[in-house]
Amino acid sequence: MYAHCQVTGRKPGFGNTVSHSHRRSPRRWNPNIQRKTYFLPSQGRRVTLTVSAKGIKVIDRDGIEAVVARIRARGEKI
């Protein structure tokens, strides 16, 4: 699954793991991505979103209707 939040746009961060001897090897820091299903009362259907933990908090704060409207305004299909 692509580690990308549909609400906040968070993506993996890239960098290096540095060992005790200072050898460097590439690594990535993935965001905490979850697949969550929400009910849209205005359409009477369920919507499954790929969201980060921060995105879940944004949905709790603003409401699913407002968040879905923002996602659609960006041109993403839900």
Image: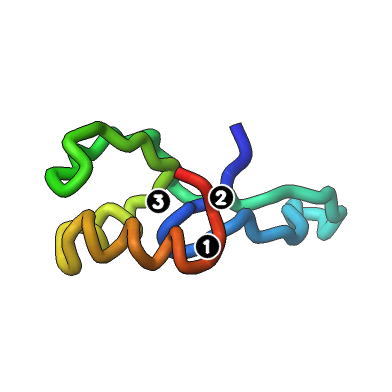
Say which of 41 and 7 sits in front.
Answer: 41
Q: How far is the residue under mark 1 from the one under mark 3?
A: 9 Å
Comes first in the chain, label 1 or label 3: 1
Residue at figure coordinates x 40%, y 48% from the top left: 51
Say which of 3 and 78 sits in front.
Answer: 78
Residue 14 relative to residue 35: left or right = right
The three-letter amino acid code for the residue at tag 1 is Gly
In the image, which disc is placed on residue 52? 3
Q: How far is the residue under mark 2 from the one under mark 3?
A: 8 Å
Residue at figure coordinates x 77%, y 57% from the top left: 16
User: Which residue is denoted by mark 1 in the rendering?
Assistant: 9
Q: What is the crowding at mark 2: few (fewer than 14 residues within 10 Å), some, or many (at least 20)? A: some
- Look at the numbered discs 2 and 1 and tell me whether their residues touch, using CB distance below 8 Å: yes
Residue 19 relative to residue 77: left or right = right
The three-letter amino acid code for the residue at tag 3 is Ser
Q: Position of residue 68 (x, y in %)?
A: 33, 56
User: Which residue is denoted by mark 2 in the rendering?
Assistant: 4
Q: Is disc 3 placed on a helix, strand or loop?
A: strand
